[in-house]
Image (spheres, rainbow, N blue to C red):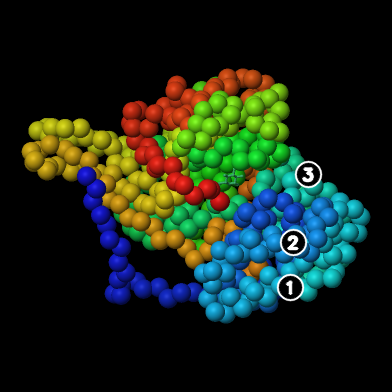
Amino acid sequence: MLGTVTTQTSDQQHVRQPQPAPSAAPGNPQPVRSLLILGASGDLTGRLLFPGLARLIATGRHEGLTIVGAGHEDWSAEQWSERVHDATAAALAESTPEGRAELERIRQESRYVQLDVTAPGALAGIIAELPAPAAVYFALPPQIAQKACETLNPHDLPEGTRLALEKPFGSSAASAAALNETLRALLPEQQIHRVDHFLGKGTVLNILGLRFANNFLEPVWNRDHIEKVEIFFDEDLALEGRAGYYDRAGALRDMIQSHLLHVMAILAMDAPARLDERDLRDAISSVLRAARVEKPFDATTRRARYAAGSIAGRSIPDYTAEEGVDATRGTETLAEITVTLASWRWAGVPFILRSGKALGMRRKEAIVTFKPVPHLPEGFTGVDEPNRLRIGFGPDVLQLDVDINGPGDVMTLNRVTLDADLSETDLLPYGEVLEGILNADPLLSVRGDTAENCWSIVDPVLAAWAADEVPMDTYPAGSAGPSGWATSAPGEDGAGGRLSGPETAGDA
Ligand code: BG6
């Protein structure tokens, strides 16, 4: 049975007027005038960056931007133009009149330069030609980003320059610390944007409103009332030709180390005084500083790799037979870790984070399972199940499972779900994050200490996996995961995970 909650706005109490956008780095609120994308011939630029940027421009939210793409490939002007046109077509079709003119201009004027970013002076030379202030977006693997930054000197960066670094930021706590050191020698922290596009997802940001603009949750949002918190991101996509990156990353580095740890931090944090970069990022950081995966890792972590199978009628080869995969790397395509938080609020509550590829169903949600009632009055029949709050990251929904009595026998308990669709934001997640970069606001960017911290949480697990301390399980592509895992059998173990059916549209 499905209850429905309709959302309505009240014009009566506590109406908060929109506040001006939080100011950016002190003394440097000037919006960005040019964007240099490094790695512009790569997949990320065409698939995510340009579409996100195009929607932002198409809604009239940023004007007068000069865009230059740089890549190691020798692309012609036509090749670049084709990339820009393809990646901006959808946004153009939905643009406002002013946005349309601006996007048309960008489609005409943006240009591509061939560049070896690691060559001394090359990157500085391009930056010097751009209208200042510029944002330089490193859509590059972390080792190349590190080398590129090492070619720069502070005087190469005009006032107001911003450096944006795509994830993964480093490949361990040590390499992230080294990259931070290089960056901080160039610019203050507030001009450095470490990108995690989950921080730009509307539903992830909705957690803030749900938790901190309602009074009913906070008194029960703790170890006394919550049994466990699960964060799932099961994808029905397989490798999709990304072996070059993914085979060196795997599910733990690709999804959990960055995205899911941030979702966890937002679910677990204390209320910040205000939604500005300092307070919000302090609150996130304090959760992640308290987070650890306890030993023994064969009890708190699991890994698996998909074998041949099929998804929605599509044949998927064994992971190790995918083009570009080196089986000796032992890369996992499904990872699960149980994180504990050393705090009064959360001591003893497991946070179970799981993500993987080539699963039969998309399951992208956080589930908060509450403890059972302390005493169920005698006389009820039926099953009393714990309350569950689900926050879906696609489809974007909020659901609360509750037990009520009736219909039929009024003393028989029945499950109902209060269900609300969460409205989508105007921008794509990359657009939200880029808007912060262009407006010189690091609110939705990962802070340097947090980036290192996320690695410190998973580094010991990665070392144990590399030493084969945890077995590599197998699951057929298209299945729900290895049969021995409780999280692969939603509903049966009481976890109650609700699978959403495969959708035809591909993932972003
Ligand atoms: C990316 C990962 O960061 O996030 C991908 O590299 C993953 O492997 C993607 O598919 C998921 O995010 P979204 O927004 O596409 O659902």
Q: Where is residue 128 drawn, in percent x and y?
A: 85, 69
The residue pinned by badge 2 equals 80
- Residue 491: quadrant of the picture: top left
The answer to which of 25 and 324 lies nearer the viewer is: 324
Left or right: 111 in relation to 366: right
Residue in the picture at 57% in, 37% down: 238
Residue 276 in view in this figure: no
Of the numbered discs in the image, which one, if any, rests on residue 109? 1
438 over 101 or under it: above or below: above
Look at the numbered disc 3 and give the secondary structure of its residue: helix
Left or right: 33 in relation to 304: right
- Residue 105: quadrant of the picture: bottom right
- Residue 123: quadrant of the picture: bottom right
Pointer 3 residue Cβ closer than 8 Å to ligand 1 = no
Query: Which comes before the other along the chain, label 1 or label 3?
Result: 1
Residue in the picture at 65% in, 68% down: 438
Mark 2 touches mark 3? (CB < 8 Å): no
The answer to which of 318 and 286 lies nearer the viewer is: 318
**Hey, which residue is sitting farthest right in the picture?**
120
Q: Specify the amino acid type for callout 3.
A: Gln
Q: Specify the amino acid type for callout 2.
A: Trp
> How many numbered discs, if any?
3
Look at the numbered disc 2 and give the secondary structure of its residue: helix
Q: Where is residue 486 drawn, in percent x and y?
A: 42, 27
Q: Nearer the viewer, mark 2 or mark 3?
A: 2
**Hey, which residue is sitting farthest left in the picture?**
409
